[in-house]
Image (cartoon, grey):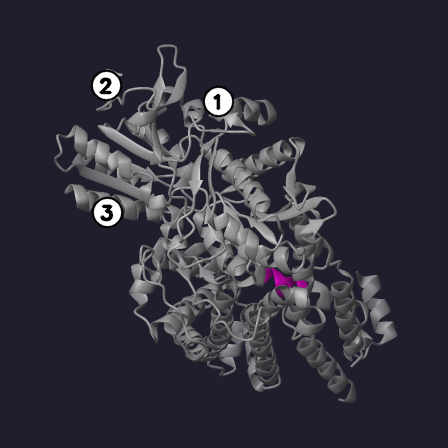
Amino acid sequence: MNKNVILYAAILIFGLAAPFVFPAFKVQLSILCVLIVLATTWNIQGGEMGYNTFGNILFYGLGMYLCASVQVGMFFPLAEWTESGGEKTFVHTPTQFFQGMAAGLVVAAVVPTIVAGLIGYAILGLRGHYFAICTLGLGVAAGEISGGIEIIGAGQGFTTPPFPNVGGLEARGEFFYFLSFGALVLTFIAVRAIYSTRFRLILNAIRDNEDKAEAMGIETMKYKIIGWMVSAFFCGLAGGIMGGLVGYIDSTDVAFDGREMGVFMVLMAILGGKGTLWGPVIGATVFHIFKEGFWTFFLGWQYVALGVLIVVIVIYFPEGIMGWLREKYPERFGEVVDEADRKAQVELK
Amino acid sequence: MKINKIILSFISAVAILLSTSVVSFAKVVGDKIVLGAAISLTGKYSSNGVHTQNGYNMAVDRINSMGGVKVGGKTYKFEIIYYDDESNPKRAAQLAERLISQDGVEFMLGPYSSGLTKAIAPVTEKYGVPMVEANGASRSLFTKGYKYLFAVLAPANLYLDVAIRTAVELNGGKGVRIAQAFEQDAFSQDVRLGILDAAKETGSEIIIDDKLPKELNDMAATLVKVKQMKPDVLVVSGHTKGALTAIRQIAEMKVDVPMLAMTHCDAAKLSKQHGKNSQYALCASQWHKTLTYKDNFFKDGMTYAADFQKEFGYDPPYQSAESSAALLVFKDAFERANSFDQKKVRDALAATNMQTFYGNIKFAPGGQNVDKPMVLFQVMCDGAGKCENKVVAPLKWASAKLIHPIPKWSDR
């Protein structure tokens, strides 16, 4: 327990001090926070429950559009804002900006949760590959549909409100950093709390053998939907923050970016080790650092390098970094290992 | 829980990594002026991204070899830091941030495409970094009140405006029936708005108004409708892929339409890729090598084209020419400001009034270039099947007469 406190304190201090110690990296660190949130929430679904989804990008994009729309729509006519030929320039006052953002984030989290409930009710009856393919379609469809809705900018894209002129040059970066770090802390605490209840065991039971779980009297459908709704809540929140951070929302390239974000969140969770609390956190961090590094040092080859990384992970660390560590140093994970038993297992292999 | 140790050491590793990452460069190091640019080297805009990069590089080499930039009695040379934005706005915004806050860049060149410029402009604006961009034409870029954004090109809504007006003129001043298909992106949608305006003013009617997906490789559905409804003008815009797809399928399906107006024909090297199939296509262009503008560095369009051909092995599309012009603008502004102060350079940029081989450059308060009209060229082929782009409008620069209507496929 004592050590846990030290660990969390260290992370918290690191997180709070980071934008001041490494001011140049604020944006990357903010994005890292968002990535960790996405990986962690994907893990609820893909890792704990065994339902590999590519559809979480739907909630992320939905959150992004909703947050920006609310932020604008509360104070100005949305259609005029997004219409590109508009000669009028709208400027949010600081109060309007922050009020709008706060209200936007609430909507960005709540609406995707409801949507997840509705869609989940319809499609969570599918299993395995069928579910994965079905969710893949969700993101693609959302991207195409949103690209045709004029009021949110359609193919023109949606420029989110610029940060008001308060607090100097660094204010915007710091605001979004602390917002995303706050979202990360909130997500982590919530997920950790959830994982310490019976709910996690139910999710694991569904993953390991859904029919058996049902036979034991667990209402699997109910728990599957709730699990997805939890994911959607934080995904939407992350999307809302990301929209403000990027400053420009494009239907398929930024919001419903299934090809990048949608796949990355799966990759990060798998890289770190799915079905663990810390895996997605570590996976997202390693992934982000590698990616940024490749971009700097292997310009033009970054995706090749990333591809090699993925291949290496799949071949050498199929269980992810956490899984690998767990296998290598089981004692450190608090597992009691009987030497004789271990030897016997090795011989069996 | 020993695992805590692992995680703790992991966190400290991250901290060390971050703190040792060198925050280096500065805008002006020794005798170098360092400019930053995020360019699409991969992704759907990669071919135009490379055209842009080649244009930048060509101008940097030329300016440096011809004496560089003289500021405060000292000579400086240009240098550009490039990053790959992967044709993704999210990435571009992030890279702009990185160029400015980590690499210390104080002056920026634009990326390729309106969407990416839209993503970068808020960042450069926030830091007060002057950006001269050559490839973001969307009108909405110039109505946001940006102070540090300067575009050497004419806004997107003017691209095919001339084509519609020409068609109406040829129709005896009566409105025409327009079929149009546009990619779902900021630039093409703005071209669309321009057409809507032109149609309204000329009393023309839009009978087909289709949207094309971003990963564009099929527009047969639109063409079937065109075959049925027989419009007077077909307008297609979707960057390089849009131009290639349209020509390929129009030829395959033998679609007859009196006028075909497009964008990005030269970037797509249409006349080379599709030869006679691309004949008669009417294309909007920011620049053409036969225009008679002049400057001291590249002399004129023909010389620029020849030099470019020698260096990169292909005829320069206007994307390269306008990118080269961006550096000429920067050089001019630095020398007039006689300083590297961002505000002074910004004011000097705003006061730009010059001629380059690419055209006249003078910025409106919104940042767009108001002194350079668009040109229209038509792909024309000789009997041997050798195709060339010839300017047909405006009449001042026309080197050939517009062929209208396009002969039917059965007569070709």
- Name the secondary structure under disc 1: helix
Q: Residue A270 in magenta?
A: yes
Q: Do labels 2 and 1 share a chain?
A: yes
- Closest to the observer: B71 or A39? B71
Crowd tier of the residue under label 1, counting other residues whose Cα lies within 10 Å: few below 14, some 14–19, many 20 or above:
some
**Image coords of residue B72 (percent x, y):** 66, 46
- Closest to the observer: A72 or A31? A72
**Residue type at mark 3?**
Asp
Residue A137 vs A333, above or below: the answer is above
Magenta part, dominant SS: helix
Query: Residue B197 got which mark?
Result: 3
The residue singled out by tag 1 in the image is B302
Q: Are marks 3 and 1 on the same chain?
A: yes
**Residue type at mark 1?**
Met
Q: Which quadrant of the figure contains the C terminus of chain B? A: top left
Residue B323 vs A292, above or below: the answer is above
Q: Which residue is drawn at 58% across and 48% down?
A: B37
Q: Residue A79 in magenta?
A: no
Q: Could you give the CA–CA distance between mark 3 and mark 2, rounded to whole angstroms?
A: 34 Å
- Name the secondary structure under disc 3: helix
**Image coords of residue B334 (percent x, y):** 59, 46
**Residue type at mark 2?**
Ser
Magenta segment:
A266-271
Q: Could you give the CA–CA distance between mark 3 and mark 1, rounded to whole angstroms?
A: 34 Å
The residue singled out by tag 2 in the image is B410
- Closest to the observer: B56 or A314? B56
